[in-house]
Image (cartoon, rainbow, N blue to C red):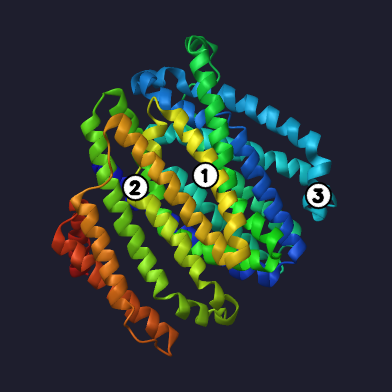
Amino acid sequence: MGIIQKQAIKSTFFSYAGTIFGFLNASILMPKILLSSDIGLLTFVNSTTKIMAAIFTLGVPLITQNLFTRYKNPNNKNNGFLSLIIWITLLGAILGSLLFFLLKDQLISSENNAAKYYVFFSLSWVILFVFRLLFLNLDIYLRMNQKTVLGVFLENFLTKIIFLFGLIAYILGIVHFDGVYWMNILAMSFPGLIILLYLISRKERFFSFKYIKRYTVRGREIGNLALFGMIGGIGSTFVTDIDKYMISNSINLSATGIYSVMMLFGMFTSISSINLKRIATPVVADSWKNKDMKNIDTIYKKSAVTQFLIGFYIFLGIWFCIDYVMQLLHFEVLYSYAKNVILFIALGQIIELATGVNAEIIATSKSYKWNTFFYLSLVGIVYTSNLIFIPIYGIEGAALATAVSFLIVNVARYFLLKIKYNLSPFSKELGIAILIGLFVFALLSFIPVFQNGILGILLNGILVTVIFWGLTYVTKISLEVNGLIIKMSKFLNSK
């Protein structure tokens, strides 16, 4: 867990910092300075390129997760595995661009009228699509080489900073909206460009027919992985937007906007786990290759405890400070009725956290096809539960539907790994962690409400931190967490 822990700390910092800047950009600055049509155009180009890039990876992430360890050899440039990725990526870029030009008129006329009047829209769309596709397929290659921090820094942090500069330039009158638009294209394209240049600087083998011949003998296996990877990628992409789409159709766009902001706070609980999963994937894949089931079980259990502790701590901080945050942002009236969206979204994420890196274990095993089935099931469950709960509970019903869906899918993943491989995320330490979380939640529920928002945030934040991590340290349920607490204490004492 040493490699996982070290990279997770750096990745988590960039992820949370990037999320804060992203919230500043999307929820505070953009609504105040841009027209709704301008925001719509930015949203349209970002969301469509994201979906198309996920589809036209042509399953490279799953192919890499399953096959890379068989060819991994740093002394021989990993037997030219990158060449396989590049050729598939090139094919995906061509197919995706052709599909866009075939569907362009329908997409623009039905989704975003502003786009049809923008002269360089098609050119900018293709540029962004290609570089997002490059990032997805090259980042998984770096991750499997246990180099995860660069991708997180580029995608989660640097993109937000670059776009923020564009918004500031717009506020100062240095650029018009055209400048903001192209700054967005630059920001979102930058991760793919930088990773490409990084791999070129390492003199990796890109377009090599010599190595491609080696992989043709596994054509059928690669084809299966590509197919199931594409389907799973499509499913996982659509899951994140189904609820917003259904809210906009069932209620209105205003409700969708409120839900999106409150959902962001709930999703904040799981940011650190995303990085942990990215880092754990190559370690788990190596363990499968070496048939080291003990290590997989250890990672499974430790990841559940670590993810739950960090995620529940973030949830407690948000839940007991959100009223004060909304007060300071003057959003308290608008968002007061939607507070439970945070609760239900966070609950769904906490369920995901408490079941560890189950999806990553399945994805790197011979049972990878089940992951595709689970993602498709999740789409169906989210859709059906939204149909049931939105008419009854409104936007809070959409959040409840998400929590129920995550519960069902993670129960299914648990039974698959338990029955097939005798693996389980549950341990005595996880049980204690859950009890600590519930105890602190109950205790802080008795804290009176403060009139001063800043004072309320400070006091609740201090209480959550001291009590939660104090109990975690005393019970010694995670040696990794205790080690971090000791290091942080020494660092603070030295200042």
Against 33, residue 448 (above or below) is below
| Residue indicated by mark 2 | 355
Please state which amino acid type lies under the numbered disc 1. Leu
| Residue indicated by mark 3 | 110
- Dot placed on the residue nearer the N-terminal end, 2 or 1: 2
Against 468, residue 64 (above or below) is above
| Residue indicated by mark 1 | 378
Q: Kindly report which numbered mark, 3 or 2, lies closer to the viewer in this rendering.
A: 2
Against 244, residue 27 (above or below) is below
Q: Kindly report which numbered mark, 1 or 3, lies closer to the viewer in this rendering.
A: 1
**Relative to the observer, which residue lies in front, 271 or 363?**
363
Please state which amino acid type lies under the numbered disc 3. Ser
Q: Residue at x 54, y 25 (%)?
A: 226
Image check: 462 left or right of 16? left
SS category of the residue bearing label 2: loop
- Real-space Cα separation, disc 1 to disc 3, in angstroms: 27 Å
Please state which amino acid type lies under the numbered disc 2. Thr
Q: Return the x and y of residue 444 as percentages of the image width and height.
A: 31, 77
Q: Return the x and y of residue 301 as percentages of the image width and height.
A: 25, 44
SS category of the residue bearing label 3: helix
- Dot placed on the residue nearer the N-terminal end, 1 or 3: 3
Give the farthest residue toward the bottom.
451
Q: Residue at x 47, y 59 (%)?
A: 267
**Relative to the observer, which residue lies in front, 217 or 443?**
443
Quadrant housing the C terminus: bottom left
Image check: 469 left or right of 178? left
